[in-house]
């Protein structure tokens, strides 16, 4: 149930961070008074129990998700205006209602808070921006051929039966390790359907990355031995595997079977490569995650290292948003709650800051995993060196981010001068179209800002209009922009969401710029800057011309940093448009006329194709012939017949 008051919308921009703190002191500000009143109304019914609270603005949008050991005490803090930071005062000024959920323990509240933050991504919470699932290596032991387990990469929900090893920091780490594991253990990596239909060994066997169990080039017993060796190695028992390979190589050499000895030698080299790559700084740790937290110039970076079975599975850097007035232990606690919401926490976690409410966090993670999870802040020895390495990496990541941001800011300033913009653009939208001779027409939009590409904001548009002439780029752009801005006008008429662009870049010259200006004018939009990018003489990259709505045209020196940046934007839009077009074309290539017949699902479609052979034969079949198909009733047969014979298609 939602508590509190609902009133008119208030613009968040009125409460800019640039405003002096005095504006928010006391409760004499009208919006602040309304927020405090809404919170005070909720306080009347709050219990002294653990739970989670959500704050909403006047439109019903979630502003913040928080957890508390005692809800009444925690929420009461928001009514003490003088003790709040400017950012939290602004949040209170926008609050018009709250939702309360009580829990049995504080650890349950912590887990629920993390789930809600990841689901709703409230603007006033510390957000874990990179929300990808980490890749794993899967030794899959189920399927049609369980006696021949496969070794493959895996990302997402762990439904398949088998052993999972990871997480790895990146797909590159998995690829590198998998390639070496294939050389070392020769386990298959193919699907069951591919395995079933092989008549001769595939290329992986030829390059000595598979033992070809599909065509009996290895016995079941020998393949089982390879599986056992793989499990031992990935479980950290690499010494046993190494000794076994050395012994086998010596035996083959003593028997003067030098070819086999060379095979074992190559496998030993692969083993040594993996050990050297993964043992960097791992020490004697078994299963441990290491978090190095560093803050500088308003940026907070958390560098994560993954140690599994005494092997280093790589590292990853996270940059957090909305942490301006947060202490680093609080930031770390919020981050860890979200980080481990869908990942397996190891027994030991090293950090250079002990997160706030450590006991609650340990209890929550331990209850999830079924074993004791413990945080450590080492002060000396090898563990301290490992932690210092993570912190140093976090510092270097921040330095790189600041250097990139400085360069990006300079480029945007140059863009303001070149294109006569009113302000430095915060949101740049780039549009492109793709088709082949007018088929599978798509439009694409990419978004960039001061921090780089915003891939979560990319959009694709399947061209729906049936009146567009094949390959008419102007009409395709008209449909894309009309759909884009009409939807934006409906969802955000007061332009407070940050989704409105400051600059539109289109692939084309004066004609495209003029057309885009007319399209926007038809929708009453005249304050968005438009720039066209066209290839220069001979269509050579590096000689692009830039066209403005006033008819002026510019070119940049071939070594200009701004030129390289604008080319990157144009090329990224082109890449995204082509990828979208290819995906649509591939889907259409596998489409069947039977897909459009009402009431025909995969089972009936399969029965029809098995009976007639092709979709064309189904289309040309008579009603009595359709009725003979297993699983097709007289009514369904009549429906299929009517669809093909009465439809305009």
Image: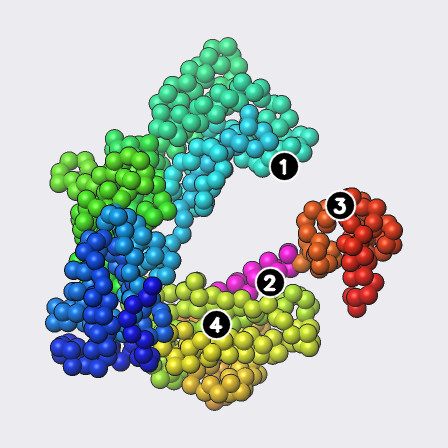
Q: Distance between the residues labelled 3 and 1?
A: 26 Å
Q: Which residue is drawn at 46% across and 80% down?
A: 489
Q: Nearer the viewer, residue 305 or 49?
A: 49
Q: Nearer the viewer, mark 3 or mark 2?
A: 3
Q: Nearer the viewer, mark 3 or mark 1?
A: 3
Q: Which of 427 and 523 is in front in this view?
A: 523
Q: How many other residues sit within 10 Å of disc 3, few (<14), some (14-19) or many (≥20)?
A: few
- Picture coordinates of residue 265, whole percent (x, y): 45, 23
Q: Which of marks 3 and 2 is nearer the N terminus?
A: 2
Q: Is mark 2 on a helix, strand or loop?
A: helix
Instruction: Name the residue carrying label 1.
Output: 193
Instruction: Name the residue carrying label 3.
Output: 631
Residue 588 position (above or below residue 468): above
Quadrant in the picture for the C terminus = bottom right
Q: What element carries label 3?
A: loop
- Picture coordinates of residue 242, whole percent (x, y): 39, 22
Q: Residue at x 12, y 72 (%)?
A: 82
Span colored in magenta: 570-587
Instruction: Name the residue carrying label 4.
Output: 430
Q: Earlier in the sequence, mark 1 or mark 4?
A: 1
Instruction: Name the residue carrying label 2.
Output: 581
Q: Residue at x 13, y 38 (%)?
A: 380
Q: Distance between the residues labelled 4 and 2?
A: 17 Å
Q: Which of marks 3 and 1 is nearer the N terminus?
A: 1
Q: Distance between the residues labelled 3 and 2?
A: 37 Å
Residue 13 position (above or below residue 446): below
Q: Is mark 4 on a helix, strand or loop?
A: strand
Q: Earlier in the sequence, mark 3 or mark 4?
A: 4
Q: Which of marks 2 and 1 is in front?
A: 1
């Amino acid at each position: 149930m939602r508590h509190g008051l609902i009133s008119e919308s208030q613009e968040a921009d009125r409460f800019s961070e640039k405003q002096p703190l005095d504006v928010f002191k006391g409760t004499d500000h009208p919006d602040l008074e309304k927020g405090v009143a809404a919170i005070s109304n909720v306080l009347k019914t709050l219990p002294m129990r653990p739970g989670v609270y959500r704050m909403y603005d006047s439109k019903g949008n979630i502003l913040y998700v928080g957890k508390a050991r005692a809800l009444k005490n925690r929420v009461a803090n928001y009514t003490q205006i003088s003790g709040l930071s400017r950012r939290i005062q602004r949040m209170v000024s926008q609050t018009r209602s709250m939702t309360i959920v009580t829990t049995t323990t504080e650890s349950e509240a912590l887990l629920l808070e993390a789930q809600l933050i990841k689901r709703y991504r409230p603007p006033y919470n510390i957000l874990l921006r990179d929300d990808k699932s980490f890749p794993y290596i899967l030794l899959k032991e189920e399927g049609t051929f369980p006696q021949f387990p496969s070794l493959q990469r895996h990302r997402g929900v762990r439904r398949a039966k088998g052993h999972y090893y990871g997480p790895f920091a990146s797909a590159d780490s998995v690829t590198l390790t998998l390639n070496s594991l294939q050389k070392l253990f020769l386990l298959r990596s193919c699907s069951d359907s591919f395995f079933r239909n092989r008549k001769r060994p595939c290329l992986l066997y030829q390059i000595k990355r598979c033992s070809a169990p599909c065509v009996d080039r290895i016995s079941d017993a020998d393949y089982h031995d390879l599986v056992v060796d793989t499990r031992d190695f990935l479980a950290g028992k690499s010494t046993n595997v190494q000794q076994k390979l050395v012994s086998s190589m010596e035996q083959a050499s003593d028997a003067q079977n030098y070819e086999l000895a060379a095979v074992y030698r190559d496998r030993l080299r692969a083993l040594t490569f993996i050990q050297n790559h993964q043992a960097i700084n791992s020490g004697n740790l078994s299963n441990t995650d290491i978090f190095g937290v560093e803050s500088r110039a308003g940026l907070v970076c958390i560098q994560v290292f993954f140690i599994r079975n005494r092997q280093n599975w790589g590292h990853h850097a996270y940059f957090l948003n909305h942490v301006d007035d947060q202490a680093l232990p609080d930031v770390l606690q919020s981050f860890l709650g979200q980080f481990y919401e869908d990942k397996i926490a190891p027994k030991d976690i090293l950090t250079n800051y002990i997160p706030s409410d450590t006991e609650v966090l340990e209890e929550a993670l331990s209850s999830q995993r079924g074993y004791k999870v413990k945080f450590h802040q080492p002060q000396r020895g090898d563990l301290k060196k490992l932690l210092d390495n993570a912190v140093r990496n976090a510092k270097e990541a921040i330095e790189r981010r600041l250097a990139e941001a400085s360069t990006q800011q300079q480029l945007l300033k140059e863009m303001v001068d070149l294109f006569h913009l009113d302000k430095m653009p915060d949101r740049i939208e780039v549009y492109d179209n793709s088709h082949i001779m007018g088929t599978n027409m798509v439009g694409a939009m990419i978004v960039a800002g001061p921090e780089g590409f915003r891939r979560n904001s990319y959009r694709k548009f399947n061209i729906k209009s049936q009146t567009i002439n094949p390959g008419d780029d102007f009409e395709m752009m008209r449909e894309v922009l009309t759909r884009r801005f009409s939807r934006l006008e409906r969802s955000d008429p007061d332009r407070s969401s940050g989704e409105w662009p400051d600059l539109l870049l289109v692939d084309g010259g004066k004609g495209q710029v003029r057309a885009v200006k007319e399209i926007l004018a038809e929708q009453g939009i005249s304050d968005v800057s438009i720039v066209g990018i066209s290839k220069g003489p001979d269509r050579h990259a590096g000689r692009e011309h830039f066209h403005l709505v006033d008819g002026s045209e510019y070119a940049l020196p071939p070594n200009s940093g701004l030129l390289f940046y604008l080319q990157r934007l144009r090329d990224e839009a082109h890449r995204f448009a082509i990828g979208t077009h290819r995906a649509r074309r591939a889907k259409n290539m596998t489409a069947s006329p039977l897909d459009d017949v009402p009431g025909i699902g995969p089972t009936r479609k399969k029965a029809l194709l098995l009976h007639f052979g092709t979709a064309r034969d189904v289309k040309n079949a008579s009603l009595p012939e359709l009725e003979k198909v297993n699983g097709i009733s007289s009514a369904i047969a009549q429906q299929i017949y009517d669809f093909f014979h009465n439809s305009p298609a």
